[in-house]
Amino acid sequence: MNRQLPIEQSKDTVPPSINLGEHWPFNVDANEVEQLGLATPKNNYNGFLPDLNKTLGLKPNGSHFHLSLNQFFGLAVIKAFSEHESTLERSKSWMLPALTSELKSKKISDEIEEFYCDESAHSLMFEQFIVGFCDSSKTDHSILKKYLPSFPESSLATRILKFNALLGGSAAWWLVMHTEEESLKIYKMIKNTDSKIDESYLTLHKKHYEEEVTHMSVAPRIIRYIASNKSILSRIGRSTDFLAMLISQTLWVLQQCGRFNSIQSYQGTDQFMINVRKAWEESSGGNPIENFLAKTRLMFLALLFTSPLNSRSIRAEIKKNRPIFGSLSLKLYEFLSNRIYKNEGSAI
Ligand SMILES: [Fe+2]
Ligand SMILES: [Fe+2]
């Protein structure tokens, strides 16, 4: 797992014609990469997500529009992962506040380093896939990026997480846990669908899945470690964990839905973006309410939004270690979770 990664190559500086195989961050044999069709951009990509009509009831007119919309939201899924993962590296200074030396003595610092290394690699891999897709479909990467998810350091969602961390809370780590769970769910969803999923896109998620399962214990262990801090400030910070997590996630989702919706105002000449806009405008999922709901489900899917309120890993962690997390906002989380998901059984 000791990989040398071009981490310093930020996503904004990825050259437009990067060769995916050259920078492949996983320990995959070069022949395998070639066989899987991942090494170079292809002429044609199949759909990235299960059939939008069958699964979500969204009915874009025209099969090529349908395919473009499907691919756009497939790219949005991996961009959402990439944004979360690259944010981790940028947020190291406040997400691991002064814990590093103590964690070293607890011998989990190597795991944390590996975790960060893995996530930076994943982010890079997803960005490269997007660039490869743009190359092959002659889509302007800088234009496409304007409509895909983004998680800037300056956003209110990030600031809330940062403030919580400065107080000694762990809201950001609860969200990491949630996102990791979503990455497994999304891979299983596209692997088990009847729809024809693009082989290279599926492999991308498969490789991601294989590494995610190796470091899934890191976030809960850090959360437990932070919870062992008995200082008053940290207790206050932690009492806001779940509130901060929910507000931050909600703000982010709303902001990204706005980005998706702005596709409607695209006036450029890029054929892929024109197809996406037309498919978005002309989707006719029965009546307007059904259409609205189908579009909302698609946007939420792309934003990894099974709500954290319905996250199995969060709920399991709370159940297992409830006494160390006891706080007012935990009660709020439990209340909302049980209330909203009562039909799926008692959450906690
Ligand atoms: Fe990842
Ligand atoms: Fe991960």
Image (tube, grey):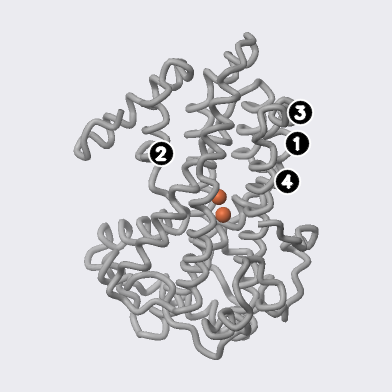
In the picture, which quadrant includes the C terminus?
top left
Give how far apart the Cα atoms at labels 4 and 1 are: 8 Å
Between circles 4 and 2, the one closer to the viewer is 2
Where ligand 1 lies, by image quadrant? Answer: bottom right
From mark 4 to mark 2, how far is it between C-alphas? 25 Å
Report helix, strand or loop for mark 1.
Answer: helix
Total marks shown come to 4
The residue that disc 1 covers is 93
135 up-or-down from 99: above or below: below
Q: Is residue 329 above or below residue 347?
A: above
Identity of the residue drawn at 64% across and 22% down = 168
Which residue is the site of mark 3?
A: 101
Distance between mark 1 and mark 2 Cα atoms = 25 Å
Q: Check disc 4: other Cα within 10 Å, few if <14, some if 14-19, many if 20+.
A: few
Mark 3 vs mark 2: in front:
3
What amino acid type is highlighted by mark number 4?
A: Arg
